[in-house]
Amino acid sequence: MTPNQVRLSTASEPATFVITLMGLIATFALSHSATLGVILSLLTGTILASPWIGPLRRRANARQRRARDQRRRQEQRQREQKILQSLPLGHQNRFWIIRNRVWSVSQSLDHRPQDPTWQQVQEQLARLPETALRLLRDLHNVERLLDQADELHLYRQIDDLAREVERASPRLGAIKASRQAVLRRRQEQLQHAHEEREVIFTQLSMIEDIIDLLRESSLLTDDTREVSCQLEDLMLTLDVTEEAAREATAIATADEVAELAVFEERIAV
């Protein structure tokens, strides 16, 4: 337990401390004198029912909620920092641009009345930086996969060489089907990666567009329902396509890696 948690459980919660102490005293007194125990039990009940216990408890609960929220924000920042460090500088800059624009729009929404629709918009808006970061991570993984196009070209050269050797060495004919299957999967994977990269680009553009829409709406109009519906549609679209984008970032399965290893070993022979 950290020092802050110790303070929170003692000094910041005098009501809990008093109740616990009275309960212990009442138990001790009851074991020695039934009358004294009953009196102290009634006194403890009176304290529990007193009007100053409720506010103390509420303040203590509020402090606990703030502490939990702070820990949650810290953990989220640590996760974001870890992902950001693995991204290229260009993707990092794009994330910070999106996050700063979201913060700017959130500030402009603070002057709005406590309308439930605007509160929902703000909650959805707060999710956009985290969603954008995940998309940028998936985009980086897709780009890494596309960088393997040179590797695929090398495998094609090896395949051509193997065909030449195959004419003189029937021993290599046994791996022909495996070799072609590996190349075909690589080609399909790269084609899928190209498609998913375009999907991710589109989703990131949608995030930036919806932020611009919210900025204009917060300054020019009070029609919040249309804005909320458009933002909700965007979030649903992002949730649906995110899983597909993540699947496209798989560079190779364990079976493909094993086949490539066997292929390279046999070609080397």
Image (cartoon, helix red, strand yellow):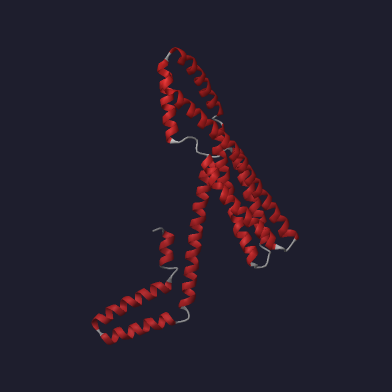
Which image quadrant is residue 124 in?
bottom right
Judge whether residue 83 can be spotted in this image. Answer: yes
| Residue plotted at (28% across, 87% down) | 35
Q: Position of residue 41 (x, y in %)?
A: 34, 82
**The C terminus lies in quadrant:** top left
Q: Residue furthest top?
A: 168
Q: Where is residue 104 in the image (x, y as percent from the top left)?
A: 67, 54
Q: Position of residue 74 (x, y in %)?
A: 50, 53
Q: Please state which of residues 70 and 192 is positioned toward the viewer in this rendering.
A: 192
Is 209 above or below relative to 222? above
| Residue plotted at (38% across, 76% down) | 19
Which image quadrant is residue 191 in?
top right
| Residue plotted at (48% across, 61% down) | 67
User: 96 left or right of 48?
Assistant: right
**The N terminus lies in quadrant:** bottom left
| Residue plotted at (47% across, 74% down) | 56
Q: Please state which of residues 92 and 58 is positioned toward the viewer in this rendering.
A: 92
User: 9 left or right of 185?
Assistant: left
User: 228 left or right of 68?
Assistant: right
Q: Which residue lies furthest to the right in this view?
A: 220
